[in-house]
Image (cartoon, rainbow, N blue to C red):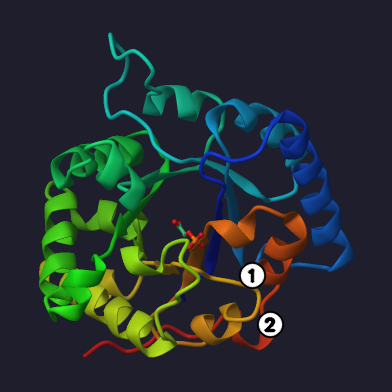
Amino acid sequence: MRKPFICANWKMNHLVNDASFYGEDLVNRIKMENVDLKKVDVAIFPPYMFMAALKVLFFLTGINVGAQNMHYAESGAYTGEVSPAMLKDMGIECVIVGHSERRQYFNETNESCAKKVKAAIAHGIRPILCVGEYLEERESGRYNDVVKEMLLGSLADIDADEMIKTVIAYEPVWAIGTGKTATTEQANEMAAFIRSVVAEKYGNEVAQQVIIQYGGSVKPDNIAELMAMSDIDGALVGGASLKASDFIKIINFDPAVVGKEPAVVE
Ligand code: PGA
């Protein structure tokens, strides 16, 4: 059984007061709406400086706090970077690796992603590896090859046990922040393809356990449809996660599809 996993990626947004208001607001709404966090994993990825405050606000609630990026080294002369040991030390549960904005603007490569995925798992932090094609790659029909290369490159040294602990987020770059969501069929087709690539490398038993998220203009009104698809197990949400009042509607998607059985991948 794959447990749904829904993440809020704040990117470079919010100030101190917004972050604490959000944290309190989310905790209250989760209580008021009786969201059962045993049935859905939820994580908030704020900028680094808000993590400690949110950890305090979320104490004993079951809401996880994650990092939007990290360095792969344990420590050292890397000005401006944050290490996996530091994240672990403050109780951070997960980390986004290789988001398309980091690949596009900060020279993140499959090689650096591979080191980060490995380092995160070594520290007991759950990595969310992002992959996804550009619009021209979608339109030229090369999208499966592009995503396969990103996946295999970024999972280079990962063994089967580590693979089970790794979450994959399929985020077509053309759907991020554009309001243009991939159709549920496009999203599910790619999620199933990603699962088949994982199955080729690690076997079907491993592939069936891997959580695959969709990201790119996920909103309260399209989440249930996405989550009902056979191979989509969660969502990485940007814009629509910036207000707790919107994000709660995403976490609290149609309960009929929470706890759905894993799909059978041939
Ligand atoms: P979006 O961003 O929901 O604003 O499209 C998703 C992401 O970049 O993770």
Question: Distance from label 1 to label 2 (Cα)?
Answer: 9 Å
- The quarter of the image holding the C terminus is bottom left
Q: Kindly identify which residue carries mark 1.
A: 39
Q: Kindly identify which residue carries mark 2.
A: 255
The picture places residue 176, in percent across and down from the top left corner, at 42, 63
Which residue occupies 35% across, 47% down?
101
Query: Which dot, 1 or 2, sits closer to the camera?
Result: 2
In the picture, residue 118 is in which quadrant? top left
Which residue occupies 74% across, 56% down?
244
Determine if residue 204 is in view: no
Above or below: residue 160 compared with residue 107: below
Query: What amino acid is labelled 1 in the image?
Result: Lys
Query: What amino acid is labelled 2 in the image?
Result: Pro
Which residue occupies 29% across, 14% down?
78
Instruction: Determine which of the numbered discs, if any, sits on residue 251 in the image.
Output: none
Dot 2 crowding, Cα within 10 Å, few <14, some 14–19, many 20+: some
Above or below: residue 203 compared with residue 245: below
* 81 or 255, nearer to the observer: 81
* 15 or 117, nearer to the observer: 15
Dot 1 crowding, Cα within 10 Å, few <14, some 14–19, many 20+: few
Which residue occupies 39% across, 37% down?
69
The picture places residue 151, in percent across and down from the top left corner, at 18, 60
Determine if residue 136 is in view: yes
The picture places residue 230, in percent across and down from the top left corner, at 41, 87
Q: Are marks 1 and 2 in contact (CB under 8 Å)?
A: yes
SS at circle 1: loop
Extreme residue in the right direction: 32
> Is residue 233 left or right of 187 when viewed as pictured?
right
